[in-house]
Amino acid sequence: MPIRLSNTALTIICLSWFVSLLCLYQLWRSSDYPFFKISLSLLLPIPLFGPVLYFWIRSFPQSKHPDLMDRSKYHTDVLDRWRDRLEASGQLPSLQRWGRKRRRRR
């Protein structure tokens, strides 16, 4: 017994597959990892939900330039930003270098 679908349902499914094919072409020409390419390629042929899930998963924000990334995970860098002002006002001792200080011989 064949499944009978209305014309609107067939139109939506055909448009969904057409969008899936366009997304598949774009996906395999991108520079994504092969794991993402394979997993999204398996998701895309699902009618109507495939392209929606594809666009939802694929919409990761772009990574920032390394100079703009916050690399301090466990501490704040407020002291580094304000060190020169605090040293000038005398509230903080001046920065000392690592290692022992060499004493001048008299």
Image: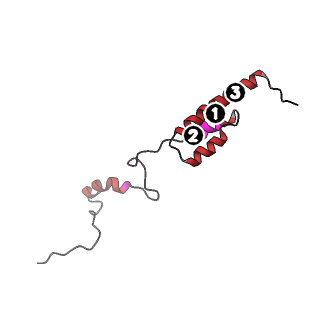
The amino acid on which the numbered mark 1 sits, given as a three-letter code, is Ser
Mark 3 in CB contact with mark 2 (< 8 angstroms) = no
Residue 58 disc label: 2
> Which segment is the magenta one?
52-78
How far across and how far down the image is residue 10, in percent?
74, 25
Residue 106 disc label: none
Callout 2: helix, strand or loop?
helix
Q: Quadrant of residue 75?
A: bottom left
Pointer 2: residues within 10 angstroms few (<14), some, or many (20+)?
Answer: few
Observer-side mark, 1 or 2, equals 1
| Residue lying furthest left | 106
The amino acid on which the numbered mark 2 sits, given as a three-letter code, is Arg
Pointer 1: residues within 10 angstroms few (<14), some, or many (20+)?
Answer: many
Quickly name the residue at label 1: 20
Q: Is residue 52 left or right of residue 100?
A: right
Q: Is residue 89 left or right of residue 64?
A: left
Q: Main secondary structure of the magenta part?
A: loop
How far across and how far down the image is residue 27, in percent?
56, 38
Asked if the stretch drawn in magenta spans residue 54, the answer is yes
Q: Residue at x 26, y 74 (%)?
A: 100
Asked if the stretch drawn in magenta spans residue 64, the answer is yes
The amino acid on which the numbered mark 3 sits, given as a three-letter code, is Cys
| Residue lying furthest top | 7
How far across and how far down the image is residue 84, in percent?
28, 55
Toward the viewer: 22 or 78?
22
Residue 14 disc label: 3
Toward the viewer: 70 or 23?
23
